[in-house]
Amino acid sequence: MAEKIKVWFDAEGDFLEVRFSEAPGYEKETAHDAVMERVDQHGKVIGFTVLGVSRFTKERPLDAELPAA
């Protein structure tokens, strides 16, 4: 069975959010200033948010890592 994801784009706020799970979690900074990871209580990545998403283009894509728990 395939995993479901949820994706939200907020044009006014200029961010994109992707969630792999409905589990409760919290946002955590990453090494990239435009990316926040969402982790559960055990530190497992359950989603991420990209801030300022409009600044990324085909010529200048976002390149970031989400560390494994």
Image (cartoon, rainbow, N blue to C red):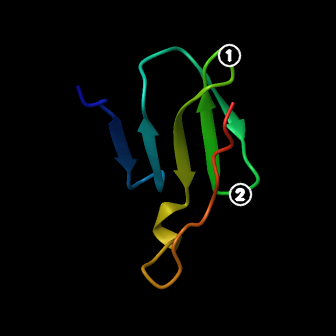
Q: Indicate left or right for 62 with 9 as reference.
A: right
* Crowd class of label 2 (few under 14; some 14 to 19; many from 20; radius 10 Å): few
Q: Residue 27 placed where, x, y %?
A: 64, 32
Q: Indicate left or right for 6 with 12 as reference.
A: left
- The amino acid marked with disc number 1 is His
Q: Quadrant of the N terminus?
A: top left
Q: Which mark is residue 32?
A: 2
Residue at figure coordinates x 25%, y 31% from the top left: 2
- The amino acid marked with disc number 2 is His
Residue at figure coordinates x 42%, y 54% from the top left: 12
In front of the other: 33 or 13:
33
Q: Residue furthest front?
A: 1
The residue beneath circle 1 is 42
Q: Earlier in the sequence, mark 2 or mark 1?
A: 2
Given this view, does label 2 or label 1 mark the residue nearer the observer?
A: 1
- In the structure shown, which secondary structural element does the residue marked by tag 2 occupy? loop
Q: Is residue 35 above or below residue 63?
A: above
Q: Indicate left or right for 19 with 27 as reference.
A: left
Q: Is residue 10 above or below residue 46?
A: below
Q: Residue 25 placed where, x, y %?
A: 59, 20
The CA span between labels 2 and 1 is: 22 Å
